[in-house]
Amino acid sequence: MERASVQNQTDFDVLIVGAGISGVGEAYHLQQQCPDKSYCILEMKDTFGGTWETHKYPGIRSDSDLYTFGYRFKPWTGVPIASAEAILTYMGEVIDENNIGQHIRYGHRITQCDWSSAENKWTVTATRTADGSEIVFTCNFLWMCQGYYDHENPNIPTWPNMDQFQGQLIHAQLWDPKTDYAGKKVVVIGSGATAATVIPEFAKEAEHVTMLQRSPTYFFCSENRNELADRLREIGIDEPTIHRVVRAQILYDQDVLTERCKNEPDAVFDELKALIRGYAGEDFEFEPHFTPSYRPWQQRLAFCPDGDVFQAAAAGKLSVVTDTIDTFTEHGIRTASGEELEADIVCVCTGFHLSVMGDIPFNVDGKPVDWHDTVNYRGMMFTGVPNLAWVFGYFRASWTLRVDLLGDFVCGLLNHMDDIGARRIEVALREEDGDMAILPWIEEDNFNPSYLTRDMDKLPQRGAKPEWRHNQDYWREKDEIPSTDLSGSEFIYDGVRRDGKNDGLKAQSA
């Protein structure tokens, strides 16, 4: 299909929402596995990259290694923990090498999605930001790859007297790269992945950095290199093989670590401490600022390449305060214990709000969709919502691992629909699910960061059975998802349910 015709077309087999790490990856899989399908990517921004383009705070980098965060199909050749710039370069290469760019419509903000069962079609209304005009697209299948951040409205708690502060107060998500912090006192509120990223950068030029945290976080310190990858390159192994082998090794190691965090959390914490001491010194004190109240991996580990946060602490450039905020003052912050923290700049790293399906209004046959009223199928499809898949990655493993898994699944599903002549697919609870407990999206003892728990009512619900949840376990899903029986009774094609025995459709109404 020529570029001009693609850019003028408005009706497609598949619409992909978002040109971030998910949308670009799924476009590749769609082209490879469903080459006859027409498709378009609608992107709100004027360029690709998603979160890597949105966030501009100092030192922005991945908190997953790029051997697993990079796509399965394109080898990563840089350092494991990569800058946003390097990730955007990598994504740009994927787009150029596979001619994906001709399928992307930049500057299109979706305002509504409407499904018609009579037409087996989605109508997607968008505003073209360049001129404000309304563009209407139609498609048979809608692939939501827009992530789960609200990119425009970060989580900023309301503290007393914030308006009295005479310095600069800015959330990291809204950081202006022109902000000058050289020679200034900087207070960073928070201790998660974003704080772990900005602190080493601030420490290079600021007079001093203070990390003010409500509660401690686990940190994982390591050299920003992969010994296995370096050795394989040294002996002349080709990059695709290096990528595949190193990816497998990292995934194996992560699986072992995840299980150990559940079964022997104290031993894991001792090992994390030993890694930190390698950068901060043997006499480094962990009490009270680096002893979390939860077990490792119940929230994300904050990765510190080359122990940069702790090198800043050892050099006297960083101090840590564990307390809550009593009030802002003209010159900084006073904590609940009465400590005064002077600041020229306060950088708020308190997370974000969830945005389910981009907060776009959805209707199915004229009825508004409340996602919290739906039950999710493996975290990607939803009861009562036909011909739609959502990419939601992993908390404990690289997001992109699930992009690859779901790319295979959705493309297999689309091909299966063609094979049986179906135009509509939806999931529904089965007869044997009648007494199944319906529960929140994820258990708090599984994963419980505040950004998730405070917005749980926005998310779809899960069932008590494995297939009716996103279990956040790549090591199970890598086997379970590819082996899914697409003729199972949870799948309804064109309004009728299959019996799961591969003997055709039977007239049982959904």
Image: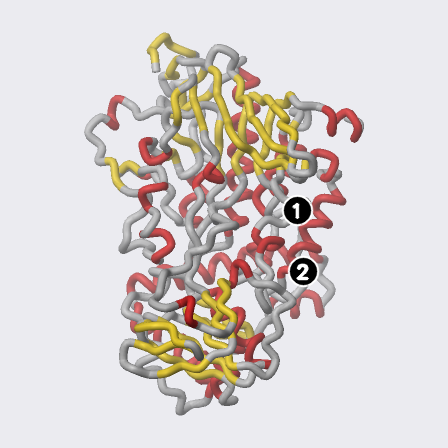
In this rendering, is residue 11 above or below 260?
above
Q: Quadrant of the N terminus?
A: top right
Q: Nearer the viewer, residue 89 or 53?
A: 53
Q: In this rendering, would 464 be left or right of 247?
A: left
Q: Position of residue 46 (x, y in %)?
A: 68, 44
Q: Position of residue 158 (x, y in %)?
A: 36, 61
In this orientation, does residue 394 appear?
Answer: yes
Q: Disc 1 vs disc 2: Cβ atoms closer than 8 Å?
A: no
Mark positioned earlier in the residue sequence (1 or 2): 1
Q: Position of residue 212 (x, y in %)?
A: 39, 75
Tell me the quarter of the picture where residue 263 sits.
bottom left
Q: Nearer the viewer, residue 266 or 234?
A: 266
Q: Position of residue 105 (x, y in %)?
A: 68, 35
Q: State the residue lying farthest toward the top.
A: 507
Numbered label attached to residue 86: 2
Q: State the residue lying farthest toward the bottom.
A: 283
Label 2 environment density (alpha carbons within 10 Å; few <14, some 14–19, many ≥20): some
Identify the amino acid type marked 2: Ala
User: Distance of mark 1 from mark 2, alpha carbons?
Assistant: 14 Å
Numbered label attached to residue 48: 1
Q: How many marks?
A: 2
Q: Quadrant of the C terminus?
A: top left
Which secondary structure lies at badge 2? Answer: helix
Residue at 47% over, 72% down: 346
Label 1 environment density (alpha carbons within 10 Å; few <14, some 14–19, many ≥20): many
Residue at 52% over, 50% down: 151
Which secondary structure lies at badge 1? Answer: loop
Instruction: Give the foreground label among 1 and 2.
Output: 1
Residue at 40% over, 67% down: 162
Identify the amino acid type marked 1: Phe
